Image (cartoon, rainbow, N blue to C red):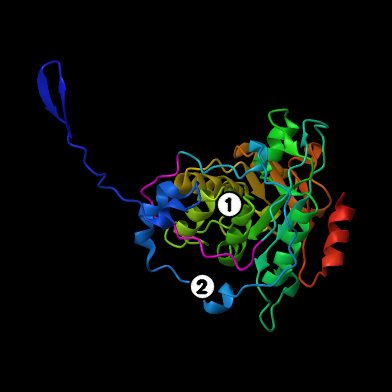
Amino acid sequence: MEFKHRGRMVLVIVAACSLLLAPTACQTHPATQSRTHSRAHVASLHTPSAATSTVVTATIATPSSAPTSSAETTPGAPSSLPSAEPVAPLPNPIATLPQPTVGRMLARPRDLGVPILMYHVIAKAPPGASNPDLYVTPEEFVQQMTYLSKHGYHAVTLKQVYSYWHGKTTLPSKPVVLSFDDGDMPDFRIVAPLLKEVRWPGVLNLIVGSDKHPRMKKEVVRALIAEGWEIDSHTISHVEVPSLSDSQLRFQIGESRHRLQKWYGVPVDFFCYPYGRFNARSIAAVKAAGYLGATSTRGGLAKPREIWKMRRVRVSGGLSPTSFAKLIGDAH
């Protein structure tokens, strides 16, 4: 169009924007929008089979409202995560979870005990599995997350719990930490898409491995970080730390933290003892490596007075919904 301004003709050309956003990009989760351009680099990533994408039927409650407090939403990915690094695309969820209702926020008591649920593999145990109790089926997991959401629980990270204990933040009235040990692909294929539905973070206690042979593909770990997951150390190679020499302790505990920090740009503030075993020397090594706390396999609620040997609630396979409800109730 044309118009005159102070005696001179000014031609204004209005050009259309050359950058067009695809509809799918507009629907991307906010924590991952800045990284969608890197997903072309992971075309070779294994795609879940049709069996893992089957929708699981679950009884779902209708939410009254969605969380609005920043303490109840998934923490964002750290700004230090390199945006140019490949991030795996998150699979579709196998079910729809109910949105948790908004509850009151807690500022006290600062010594509040918090349940840390301990999971290992979210999959059906294969025939002859040496530890079948470590396997929770996807159907059971959906039922358990549905129960937590319907009954007012909100998932938080260990760092949020730590900050609450130290008077730096509030927590939802019924906080729960969802921890997953070792680093298995169902954490990515099954768990992460489900938790994204309700904007809940998970806590991955990752066996680190080596640079060329990490336990979990790096682009997959980046995808979890992008969804707000907390990454903590579970040693380099999943060894019992009480029997290690001083140099081995520094390697398994200190070097594992350093590698995760270097690879992913995350703080790695907590350590998880393999097999739940620890002693005074291993606790001292965890402190010396700069962690803020550590988790064990002892049963019960995590409390600030046991920050270097926090208790967890083991979730075994085969639990009925009633048994899971009792497990959570007994933990409190």
Percent of width and height locating residue 84? 36, 48
Q: Please tell me whether mark 2 sits on a helix, a strand or a loop.
A: loop
Query: Can residue 198 be spotted in the picture?
Result: yes
Residue at position x 82%, y 47% from top? 301
> Relative to the observer, which residue lies in front, 22 or 320?
22
Percent of width and height locating residue 265? 47, 43
> Relative to the observer, which residue lies in front, 231 or 71?
71
Q: Quadrant of the N terminus?
A: top left
The residue sitting at the left extreme is 8
**Category of crowding for the residue at label 1, using alpha-carbon neighbours closer than 10 angstroms: few (below 14), some (14–19), many (at least 20):** many
Q: Which residue does the numbered mark 1 point to in the structure image?
A: 252
Amino acid type for the residue under numbered disc 1: Gln
Q: Which residue does the numbered mark 2 point to in the structure image?
A: 48
Q: Nearer the viewer, mark 1 or mark 2?
A: 2
Percent of width and height locating residue 74? 61, 45
Tell me which label, 1 or 2, sits earlier in the chain. Answer: 2
Query: Can residue 292 be spotted in the picture?
Result: no
State the mark number for residue 14: none
Amino acid type for the residue under numbered disc 2: Pro
Residue at position x 50%, y 47% from top? 31
Residue at position x 74%, y 60% from top? 146
> Relative to the observer, which residue lies in front, 261 or 251?
261
**Category of crowding for the residue at label 2, using alpha-carbon neighbours closer than 10 angstroms: few (below 14), some (14–19), many (at least 20):** some
- Our reading of the magenta stretch's main secondary structure is loop
Magenta stretch, residue numbers: 80-96
The residue sitting at the bottom extreme is 127
Q: CA distance from mark 1 to mark 2?
A: 32 Å
Q: Please tell me whether mark 1 sits on a helix, a strand or a loop.
A: helix
Q: Quadrant of residue 73?
A: top right
Residue at position x 61%, y 68% from top? 94
Q: Is residue 40 above or below residue 76?
A: below
